[in-house]
Image (cartoon, coloured by chain):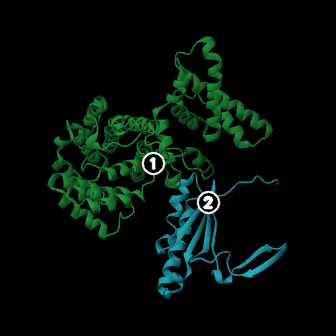
Amino acid sequence: MEIGDFYDREYGRILATLIRLVRDFDLAEESVQDAFAAALEQWPAEGAPRNPAAWIVSTARHKAVDRLRRRALLDKRRGEIESLARLDLERAEDVAEPEDCLRLIFTCCHPALAPEAQVALTLRKAKIRDARIPYRVPEGADYAERLDAVLAVVYLVFNEGYTASFGERLVRAELCAEAIRLARMLVELLPASTEARGLLALMLLHDARREARVDANGDLVRLEDQDRSRWDRARIAEGIALVEAALRGRPPGPYAVQAAIAAVHAEATDAAATDWRQIAALYSVLLRLQPTPVIELNHAVAVSMADGPEHGLRILDRLEAREELATYHLFRVARAELLLRLGRPAEAAQEYERALGLAANESERRHIHKRLAELPSGS
Amino acid sequence: MRYICLIYDDESTFAKMSEAEGAKVMQEYMQFTDGIVKSGHHRAGDPLQPSTTATTIRTKNGKVVTTDGPFVETKEQLGGFYIVEAANLDEALKIAGRIPSVRYGGAIEVRPIMEIPRAR
């Protein structure tokens, strides 16, 4: 067995278990590192244990006891000795419980922690310890609210991977994979949550298109131009099956509806076969659940495909009048495309120019340059 | 673990109240305090005189300087505090959420108290 792969796969789960056992983020992290260091020494020589995760948890627990004992010698604080006694006496089950991961994720999404810090666990560790944020999955009304925050963070991780907000690389696949792994775990542990299913479905369906979304130069390829033979059919099938389960929520939640939209795209054999009428209908459902300008923008694009560009443009102009997306480059791009379809290339060029002034991702900028260059001459 | 709940109010809210309204707020505070005394969470707590009575001391160019008024001029001023005993932040937040000022546009800052062992 490759210890490196094992580490990548199991580290989070094992750390979460140790945090439960030792109730100290720093101590847990140090002890798990110690245990992996011990594994690197022993496993190649003596062979990997039958249950490697249990071995690491058990070794890490012993390392934690050692560390506490050393600390207690230096500093005879009563609390430390008490927790040492508890750890020694407790016949702890040395198994990584899946609930431990859940506890960790829910704790990290506590409303007392700043949302901008919610992706980086290390930043939150000090406050979790010092303010004593309880290490648990909350109950009752708090649970529903916290689950929303948990799903939002997972989706944030995915989106940062799917379209990196800065830098030269458009896609960071490792972040997408991590978000999907977390969502799979949530679906497994929270079978009653249709929104967890919806989110997993949504991410699988987006991720299925990842390879076709970027060309050899690392540039963005629009949905209608993508080589659909490069879409990951297994992921699509898994996503569609999950959408059906997710839509059974009463009422269906926003992730389920977004996943349903992605599923309609995935089911079309080519761009022309896309059922735009259904997509426009799903966007109007979504708009009722989440009345945001970005969803209105997507609704406008779907309407323009189902009913004609002039209908889409009317919605965009209403949005523009409210000045809500004026500085959003994709709004400018969408408006440019509709103007082009309406035979107004000069105005389209102006919109592309404005989009260039707003887009920060290099790959997206190259795409806009390309569209500009393709405009009919004389504009 | 002890937490301090610092109560920040817009002082003008209370200044503008009628006598009856002011008495009602006072009554709510007394009920709240009695409640957390009975439940065993209360460790300390008092209202403060208005911020116009505040004096701030700091060092300027190596000299201790005394100035009139609170440390910072903001709309919300420290109006009082509680120290409560709670098992964790969630419990402390639940208690702080019941402080009457929350319902009158005030804000409560909840901070864990750093426990320093003292020789007796």
In the picture, measured across the screen, residue B78 lies left or right of residue A288, that is right
Residue B6 pos. (x, y %): 60, 67
| Badge 1 and badge 2 both on one subunit | no
Mark 2 belongs to which amino acid?
Arg
Q: Position of residue A119 (x, y in %)?
A: 51, 46
* Residue A114 image offset from top left, x and y in percent: 52, 55
Residue A326 appears in the picture as rendered? yes
Number of marks in the image?
2
Farthest residue toward the top? A46
**Which residue is more in the foreground, A369 or A124?**
A369
Figure check: A13 above or below B115: above
| Residue A316 position by quadrant | bottom left
Identify the chain drawn in green.
A
Residues A195 and B23: in front is: A195
- Which residue is nearer to you in this view: B105 or A204? A204
Q: Is residue B7 above or below residue A218?
A: below
Q: Which chain is depicted cyan?
A: B
Q: Judge the density around disc 1: few (<14), some (14-19), many (≥20) Cα neighbours within 10 Å.
A: some
| A165 left or right of A71 in image | left
